[in-house]
């Protein structure tokens, strides 16, 4: 245990109570800072600019340390590793698919998706995993000048020195500044955003050098936070608790032989010890009444720690939003209770899935725009509508849903006949029911396509 702790401290310079230490340092750093005076006028005192930085981010050094510790926990802590992997498994599941309205657009997106460097079928799980692990993802893009073909790269979040936002809107990220290293100077990337210059040839299109996506942050924070950020201390403490129990268990299995040699002098005791060897299991031993053998075991006052372990585990899982029976804690939980406990986590996972779907749609939009800019797509009015289908979070009872769909169709027919519901509303209800079966059906308001 001591060696393990020394390795972690050597790698990260880590101390116990990481989260508490972060906020203590951040408060100390900002101590005494007052609201800025916008101008020199006396009546401006106590007011601040609407666009002023309100210190919702960690310092760059602390941000990098947070991400390094999250990676360390993912590598060494079984519960942290499983939390990140489980989120990834649910979000991408059997894989993501897409369908474009226009065949030419579909061909361009398929070419982008299957590109050996982009390799979305292979890398989609890794991208979801690292989004949760680091709290942000950065993908530099290279665009072929001849045909507008797009290739994505990867920038480690710990390589970022600064995230620059629009001075008038903190929610719009304009630039990413990468740290300089030996042999590689600092570099500034323009984040992919709509071109808002009316005189530009690419006005209205997405342009830029890098995609930037961030999660687990408030609106006026510039950088994302790891899923493990608020759990780091608890995960580390639980890990230490279990290792301490492991060491105690090992000590409980340790014993020694105490041999009393009645009437022996020290020289005789030393000679006797030289002639003896440790008894082997199931061996025979003989001695007279002056020699007494007894095994001594440590009395450590060991007790059942299962309730304490359960308390710590539930604290971590409650913070992470996972039910205990997903982590081998199903004692006393019935099937009905388990289903009810799964509802909140399904909502959380659906939210993450929806964000990743937005990421893909935004990247697709950039790919289509580059194809239009470089005349790979010649029709400026081509339909840019693309349906991205995410995997189902849970396998549904198809028989029950199908039976329910049958009754709903009959009810809708009666409702239309008696004019209780319009045909348009009936189609919308039917489309919703089909979506529960995993089928994408176009509702009336979606007909005609969207760009």
Image (cartoon, rainbow, N blue to C red):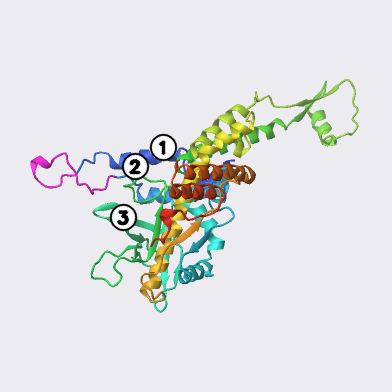
Indicate the position of residue 106 as horizontal and vertical percent values: 48, 68
State the CA–CA distance, disc 3 to disc 2: 25 Å
Per the image, the residue denoted by label 1 is 20
**Crowdedness near tag 3: few (<14), some (14–19) or many (≥20) residues, C-alpha within 10 Å:** some
- Judge whether 154 appears above or below 326 on screen: below
Mark 1 touching mark 3, by CB under 8 A? no
Numbered disc 2: secondary structure:
helix
Residue 191 appears left or right of 281: left
Numbered disc 3: secondary structure:
strand
**Residue 385 figure quarter:** bottom left
Circle nearer the N terminus (3, 2): 2
Circle nearer the N terminus (2, 1): 1
Camera-nearest residue between 411 and 294: 411
Marker disc for residue 396: none
Q: At 47% from the left edge and 71% from the top edge, which residue is drawn?
A: 108
Determine if residue 68 is in view.
Answer: no
State the CA–CA distance, disc 1 to disc 3: 30 Å
Tag nearer the camera, 3 or 2: 3
**Magenta highlight range:** 36-54
Indicate the position of residue 163 as horizontal and vertical percent values: 33, 56
Locate the N terminus by quadrant.
Answer: top right
Per the image, the residue denoted by label 3 is 172
Numbered disc 1: secondary structure:
helix
Residue 159 appears left or right of 126: left
Circle nearer the N terminus (1, 3): 1
């Amino acid at each position: 245990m001591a060696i393990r702790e020394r390795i972690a401290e050597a790698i990260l310079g880590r101390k116990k109570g990481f989260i508490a230490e972060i906020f203590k340092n951040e408060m100390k750093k900002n101590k005494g800072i007052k609201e800025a005076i916008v101008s020199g006028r006396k009546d401006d005192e106590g007011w601040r600019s609407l666009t002023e930085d309100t210190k919702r981010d960690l310092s760059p050094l602390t941000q990098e340390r947070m991400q390094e510790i999250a990676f360390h926990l993912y590598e060494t802590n079984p519960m942290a590793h499983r939390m990140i992997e489980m989120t990834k498994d649910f979000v991408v599941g059997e894989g993501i698919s897409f369908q474009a309205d226009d065949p030419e657009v579909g061909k361009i997106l398929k070419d982008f998706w299957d590109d050996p460097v982009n390799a979305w079928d292979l890398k989609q799980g890794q991208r979801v995993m690292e989004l949760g692990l680091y709290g942000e993802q950065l993908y530099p893009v290279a665009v072929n000048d001849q045909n507008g073909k797009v290739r994505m790269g990867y920038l480690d979040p710990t390589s970022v020195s600064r995230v620059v936002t629009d001075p008038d809107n903190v929610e719009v990220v304009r630039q990413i500044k990468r740290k300089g290293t030996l042999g590689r100077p600092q570099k500034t990337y323009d984040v992919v955003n709509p071109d808002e210059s009316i005189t530009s040839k690419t006005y209205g299109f997405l342009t830029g050098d890098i995609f930037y996506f961030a999660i687990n942050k408030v609106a006026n924070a510039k950088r994302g936070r790891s899923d493990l950020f608020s759990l780091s201390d608890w995960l580390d403490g639980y890990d230490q608790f279990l290792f301490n129990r492991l060491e105690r268990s090992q000590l409980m299995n340790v014993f020694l032989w105490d041999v009393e040699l009645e009437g022996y002098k020290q020289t005789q005791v030393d000679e006797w010890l030289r002639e003896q060897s440790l008894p082997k299991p199931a061996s025979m031993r003989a001695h007279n009444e002056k020699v007494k053998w007894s095994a001594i075991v440590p009395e450590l006052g060991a007790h059942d720690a299962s309730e304490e372990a359960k308390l710590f585990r539930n604290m971590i899982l409650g913070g992470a939003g996972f039910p205990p029976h997903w982590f081998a804690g199903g004692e006393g939980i019935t099937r009905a209770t388990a289903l009810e406990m799964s509802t909140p986590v399904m909502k959380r996972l659906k939210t993450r899935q929806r964000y990743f779907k937005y990421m893909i749609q935004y990247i697709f939009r950039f790919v289509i725009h580059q194809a239009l800019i470089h005349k790979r797509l010649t029709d400026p009015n081509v339909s840019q509508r693309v349906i991205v289908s995410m995997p189902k979070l849970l396998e549904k009872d198809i028989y029950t849903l199908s039976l329910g769909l049958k009754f709903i169709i009959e009810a809708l027919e009666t409702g239309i006949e008696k004019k209780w519901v319009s045909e348009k509303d009936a189609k919308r209800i039917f489309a919703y029911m089909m979506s529960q079966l995993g089928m994408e059906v176009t509702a009336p308001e979606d007909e005609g396509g969207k760009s």
